[in-house]
């Protein structure tokens, strides 16, 4: 699950494999934007079958890859 | 002029013109504030009707400035905060702005520069001053000038005359609302993007209430949905992308917006996927698709999407030309092609604007007078075909793309990329998801190795780009390559690059 989420994020953010770290600040660094977040929700559902409700997740809950993984795992 | 007459008419009622984050502006207040702003402009600049530049986003006082400029006979030049200060200053220089309002103190230069505080002082000082309708912008006077992406890397100004917008009202107004009742229309689109004219002109002139959705709400879907629920919106106006942003949520359905009568879409391809989702979740709401370039005043087609169109294997049509609008689809020699065949779409209409601001060379290339129909014509650069009365869009004939509804010249991004330190060459490619551009990807050639990882480097490059380009034009992926694949003409081989994506 972790690897898959990292791979989705790398693809959306345009990072090479292994380049994103668990605590990379995605919004602060300007790597992820509003449309990127929506792509993330769509891909997580498509590839992992986990539905994230976008209206219930704020940016502060999705600030780093580790936090995103935690939110997905909670709902898996 | 219908818009200002509409505001005057509803100023005598108790209708609400604007709801912006809990703040309400009545028509009476809007009328008074815009009169005050117009009185100041007339006092300060008299007969000099140079356009007024307004830099901001969805601040409540943006609208009094826009209508005030028009009441004083001046065009407004709205520049949204997605445009970085440097580019905004360039725009103010291009129109040789004498008066400018800058809600963000970005260092714009004009003879009279008002920030938010100074604007409030002016409005207070001139409160109660009425401006006679003799001063209003009319006929062939410019109503607004919008700056869009230009292929040289500098923004290009598109002025639209009052009579062009009057034609839009005549032909399209009934699609917005015919009841005359007090209804709510969405005010989500940046004023610097011409689709905002549907709310700011057609909605306002009908006494509708504009409900503001700003950038901050869009970044936080929880807050956005709270606002959609509170809005009581009847008429939704947006790009398909904005609606697509909402669709991953299960809450996006008729119970969220029970009064919603219609979605009006403009600005980019409307996909089957979105239509299906809306038909399912909003069975009581119509979906209206429209099409038009900024040069021909917002939109020149409109059609309600039927179940039949949704079930059709063909893409969703851009609709039928409105009333007086005539279309012609031509081949490379300018000869009309038979039905069903693709060619360049030419628009012949009273909505076709005067041309490009201060660029007679560009105007001569794209605008013309059509003797056969007695109308002004515009070569869209869009490929299209006709099937019966309906027209279908097939993409661009040049390197312009639509990204989330924004018009982007690929060369504009490339020309700005090579100005970034240590980049000697750049190529930008659109990344498609089905029929729609989903994001931009850039390939760059470095002057010398920088020892950075790709991610670190792209963070740096994006930062530099945000200084000079609107945020939506900054590519999502930036990859450094050792060399560019070249085709036989010695040009960058975009097909080969595409394979690297």
Image (spheres, coloured by chain):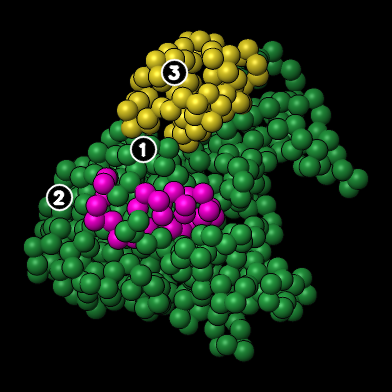
Count neighbours of disc 1 (C-alpha within 10 A) and say few if under 14, some if 14 to 19, many if 20 or more. few
Disc 1 from disc 2: Cα separation: 30 Å
Image coordinates for residue A54, horizontal then vertical, percent: 38, 31
**Which residue is under mark 2?**
B24
- The foreground one among B66 and B373 is B373
Secondary structure, mark 2, is: strand
Expressed as whole percent of the image width and height from the top left, the position of residue B253 reads 33, 46
Chain B colour?
green
Q: CA distance from mark 3 to mark 1?
A: 17 Å
Front-most of residues B465 and B195: B195
The boundaries of the magenta stretch are B255-282
Pinpoint the chain carrying mark 1. Answer: B
Q: Secondary structure at mark 3?
A: loop
Q: Is residue B313 visible?
A: yes
Most extreme residue toward the right, as rendered? B488
Asked if one can make out residue B109 in the rendered structure from this viewpoint, the answer is no
* Residue drawn at x 53%, y 53% as measured from the top left: B272
Residue placed under numbered mark 3 in the picture:
A76
Element under disc 1: loop
Report which quarter residue B203 is drawn in.
bottom left
Tell me the colour chain A is drawn in.
yellow
Q: Front-most of B184 and B41?
A: B184
Which chain does tag 3 point to? A
Residue holding disc 1: B250
> In the image, is B34 to the left or to the right of B221?
left
């Amino acid at each position: 699950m972790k690897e898959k989420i990292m791979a989705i994020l790398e693809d959306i953010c345009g990072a090479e494999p292994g380049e994103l770290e668990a605590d990379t600040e995605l919004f602060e660094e300007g790597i992820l934007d509003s449309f990127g977040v929506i792509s993330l929700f769509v891909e997580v559902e498509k590839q992992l079958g986990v539905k994230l409700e976008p209206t219930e997740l704020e940016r502060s809950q999705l600030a780093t890859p580790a936090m995103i993984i935690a939110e997905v795992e909670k709902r898996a | 002029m219908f818009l200002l007459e509409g505001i005057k008419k509803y100023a005598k009622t108790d209708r609400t013109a604007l709801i912006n984050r809990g703040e309400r502006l009545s028509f009476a207040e809007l009328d008074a504030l815009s009169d005050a702003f117009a009185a100041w402009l007339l006092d300060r600049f008299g007969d000099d009707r140079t356009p007024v530049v307004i830099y901001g986003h969805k601040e409540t006082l943006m609208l009094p400035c826009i209508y005030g400029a028009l009441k004083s006979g001046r065009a407004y030049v709205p520049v949204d905060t997605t445009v970085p200060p440097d580019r905004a200053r360039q725009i103010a220089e291009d129109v040789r702005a004498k008066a400018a309002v800058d809600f963000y103190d970005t260092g714009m230069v004009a003879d009279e520069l008002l920030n938010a505080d100074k604007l409030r002082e002016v409005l207070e000082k001139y409160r109660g001053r009425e401006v006679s309708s003799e001063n209003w912008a009319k006929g062939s006077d410019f109503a607004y000038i919008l700056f869009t992406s230009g292929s040289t890397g500098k923004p290009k100004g598109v002025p639209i005359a009052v009579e062009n917008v009057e034609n839009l009202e005549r032909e399209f107004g009934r699609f917005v609302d015919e009841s005359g009742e007090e209804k709510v229309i969405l005010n989500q689109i940046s004023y610097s993007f011409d689709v905002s004219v549907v709310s700011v002109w057609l909605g306002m002139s009908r006494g509708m209430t504009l409900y503001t959705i700003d950038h901050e709400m869009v970044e936080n879907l929880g807050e956005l949905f709270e606002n959609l629920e509170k809005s009581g919106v009847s008429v939704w106006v947006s790009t398909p992308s904005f609606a697509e942003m909402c669709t991953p949520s299960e809450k996006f359905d008729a119970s969220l917006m029970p009064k919603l009568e219609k979605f009006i879409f403009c600005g980019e391809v409307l996909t089957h996927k979105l239509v299906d989702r809306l038909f399912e979740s909003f069975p009581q709401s119509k979906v209206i698709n429209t099409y038009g370039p900024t040069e021909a005043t917002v939109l020149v087609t409109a059609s309600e999407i039927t179940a039949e169109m949704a079930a059709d294997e063909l893409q969703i049509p851009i609709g039928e030309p409105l009333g007086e609008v005539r279309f012609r689809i031509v081949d490379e020699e300018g000869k009309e092609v038979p039905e069903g065949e693709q060619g360049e779409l030419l628009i012949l209409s009273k909505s076709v604007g005067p041309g490009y601001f201060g660029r007679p060379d560009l105007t001569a290339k794209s605008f013309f007078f059509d003797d056969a129909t007695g109308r002004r014509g515009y070569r869209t650069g869009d490929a299209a075909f006709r099937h019966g009365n309906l027209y279908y869009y097939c993409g661009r004939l040049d390197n312009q793309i639509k990204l989330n509804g924004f018009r982007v010249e690929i060369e504009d991004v490339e020309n700005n990329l090579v100005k970034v330190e240590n980049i000697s060459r750049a190529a930008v490619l659109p990344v498609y998801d089905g029929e729609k551009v989903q994001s931009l990807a850039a390939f760059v050639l470095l002057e010398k190795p920088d020892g950075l990882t790709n991610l670190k480097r792209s963070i740096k490059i994006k930062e530099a780009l945000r200084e000079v380009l609107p945020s939506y034009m900054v590519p999502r992926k930036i990859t450094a390559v050792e060399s560019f694949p070249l085709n036989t003409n010695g040009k960058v081989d975009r097909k080969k690059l595409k394979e690297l994506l």
